[in-house]
Image (cartoon, rainbow, N blue to C red):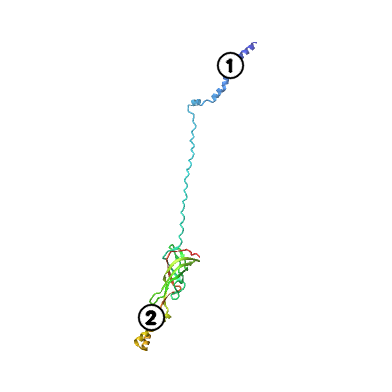
């Protein structure tokens, strides 16, 4: 019984102790252990007496500046190349030709056709060949007449309006400036004989009047015939002739361009 009372007393004291705080101490023990292991930063700072190291501040990340678009140079518009000027011969250009056929004031007349060929190539001011050698020039006789006396000069004028080469025909305006003509007498023609006869008649009449007889008439006729022959020689025609192959120099009376004649 005594033992039972002591055990009961012991249990009662233990319960009282527990009620007075023994249990609370037991409950707080884990927290206290936690407080000791995980001391606040302030406690650590106070213990070490040094401020806690702050993490280095990262410099702000700057985005690389985007390059500003540069204006693209506009392609320079090239002006159109000038069109090359066509070959041209200026007014006043001289061209040497060779006569293709003979012309004669005794046989030919105004308006007859004329043909000649270029003696050499003709180039423009830039050295470009415009008319080749051997080009055929076509034209007409614009004037022709024999000399009326041995001391006189005949007349011959030629104009050209077309030239042919390379299978094409072009318009040209040119006139002969120099002609390689020669003068040639015709000899005693029927017209010249008539002049001699007329002189004889005139002489016979004059002798009859002067002499009064047949002798005077005969003398007058002889003298008249001689005078008539002199008149015939002095007044006979002298032909102007342009031989085949003779030189003809023409001069352009208007600029020449390669404008083909249609048809």
> What x and y, as percent, mark residue 151?
38, 76
> What x and y, as percent, mark residue 148?
39, 76
Determine if residue 222 is in view. no
Q: Nearer the viewer, residue 82 or 3?
A: 82
Task: Tell me which residue sits at (58%, 16%) in the image.
Answer: 19
Task: Tell me which residue sits at (56%, 23%) in the image.
Answer: 31
Give the residue at mark 2. Answer: 231
- Disc 2 from disc 1: Cα separation: 193 Å
Q: Nearer the viewer, residue 110 or 41?
A: 110
Considering the numbered disc 2 on the image, is that residue within a helix, a strand or a loop? Answer: helix
Q: Which circle, 2 or 1, is nearer the viewer?
A: 2
Which of the two discs, 2 and 1, labels the residue nearer the N terminus?
1
Q: Quadrant of residue 24?
A: top right
Considering the numbered disc 1 on the image, is that residue within a helix, a strand or a loop? Answer: helix
Density class for disc 2 (Cα within 10 Å; few <14, some 14-19, many ≥20) is some
Give the residue at mark 1. Answer: 19
């Amino acid at each position: 019984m005594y033992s039972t009372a002591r055990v009961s007393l012991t249990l009662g004291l233990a319960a009282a102790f527990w009620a007075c705080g023994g249990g609370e101490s037991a409950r707080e023990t884990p927290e206290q252990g936690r407080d000791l292991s995980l001391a606040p930063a302030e406690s650590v700072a106070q213990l070490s007496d040094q401020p806690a190291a702050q993490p280095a501040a990262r410099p702000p990340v700057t985005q690389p500046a985007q390059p500003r678009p540069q204006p693209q140079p506009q392609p320079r518009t090239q002006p159109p190349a000038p069109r090359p000027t066509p070959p041209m011969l200026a007014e006043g250009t001289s061209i040497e030709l060779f006569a293709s056929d003979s012309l004669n004031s005794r046989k030919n007349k105004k308006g007859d056709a004329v043909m000649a060929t270029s003696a050499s190539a003709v180039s423009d001011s830039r050295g470009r060949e415009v008319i080749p050698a051997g080009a055929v020039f076509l034209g007409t006789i614009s004037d022709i007449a024999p000399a009326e006396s041995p001391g006189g000069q005949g007349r011959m004028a030629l104009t050209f309006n077309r030239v042919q080469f390379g299978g094409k025909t072009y318009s040209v305006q040119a006139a002969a400036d120099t002609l390689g003509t020669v003068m040639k007498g015709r000899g005693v023609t029927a017209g010249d004989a008539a002049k001699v006869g007329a002189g004889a008649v005139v002489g016979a009449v004059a002798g009859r009047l002067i002499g009064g007889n047949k002798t005077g008439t005969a003398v007058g006729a002889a003298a008249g015939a001689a005078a008539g022959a002199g008149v015939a020689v002095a007044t006979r025609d002298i032909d102007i002739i342009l031989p085949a192959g003779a030189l003809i120099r023409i001069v352009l009376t208007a600029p020449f361009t390669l404008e083909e004649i249609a048809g």
